[in-house]
Amino acid sequence: MRPDPARTDGGAWDPALYLRYGDERSRPFADLMARVRAVSPAVVVDRGCGEGSLTARLAQRWPGARVTGVDSSAAMLAAARAHARPGRVDFVLQDVRDWRPSGPVDVLVTNAVLQWVPGHERLLVEWRSRLSPGGWLAVQVPGNFGAPTHVLLRELCRSSRWADQVGNVPRGSDVVLEPGGYFDVLTAAGLTVDVWETTYLHVLTGSDPVLAWVRATQLRPVLARLGDDDAAEFTAEYAAALREAYPERPDGTTLLPFRRIFAVGSLPA
């Protein structure tokens, strides 16, 4: 198996840490799926399903469908199997780029995954070819690579103190397209396309909440390159920069703006 970069660019994924802000992370999925108007699909696929709770929502929405979640994180799949119903909701441990369905797919979803996959435009075209007549393709990716969470991380990684160890780790801005790019790719593939973007304003609480948010995702591959002492030093430096960029408000909350890009395409029946 050639694992997905989303699951192997350093360090294991932690389902519990990822779900600390589960409500906030699931809201874009709900907004994405609200634009998918499939009535009674027979085959539904969630590529990059993570810990499976959102895949389970697909099965609840379409009780007659066979739903398959695909991910290459063993830790995430172990958590996902709590939602499994053999023959009805199944989970597969494999790279999302490599897994192939046995037949046409009626709804194919990929939520907050493709930012880890360079050149994923080609994947989208291939996945479109797997759709049945009247099939749907739904995509959501973060579009916040110019936000302080990412800018500060890139700057710190490329500083003289850390460049030799982690200077080439952060990425995303060179992988994710702007909304018009997804419109062009999917339209050229023959889909009728709906593309939009939303900036969510997440209201976080607790100590260093923005650090806790990014520790579950973009910080993970950086820390995996560092030994324990260096990781603690790096984290402390990054946390201080985040506190300045995202100050705690008088009521104890911290606001985290988060831009996301959505694309939904459908084929003629």
Image: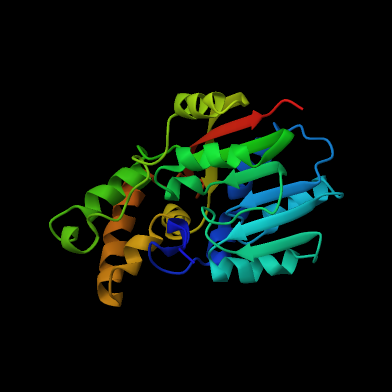
- Residue 160: x, y in percent? 12, 56
Horizontal side of 254 relative to 104 (left or right) equals: left
Q: Is residue 201 visible?
A: no
Q: Residue furthest left?
A: 160
Residue located 35% across and 37% down the image: 146
Q: Nearer the viewer, residue 56 or 22?
A: 56
Horizontal side of 28 relative to 136 (left or right) equals: left
Q: Nearer the viewer, residue 14 or 55?
A: 55
- Residue 8: x, y in percent? 42, 64
Horizontal side of 49 relative to 90 (left or right) equals: left
- Residue 151: x, y in percent? 30, 43
Q: How many marks?
A: 0
- Residue 252: x, y in percent? 50, 50
Residue located 77% across and 27% down the image: 269
Horizontal side of 92 relative to 196 (left or right) equals: right
Say above or below: 269 vs 119.
above
Residue 131 figure quarter: top right
Please, which colouring scheme is shown?
A: rainbow
Q: Nearer the viewer, residue 213 or 146?
A: 146
Q: Is residue 190 visible?
A: yes
Residue located 74% across and 64% down the image: 83
Q: Residue furthest right?
A: 64
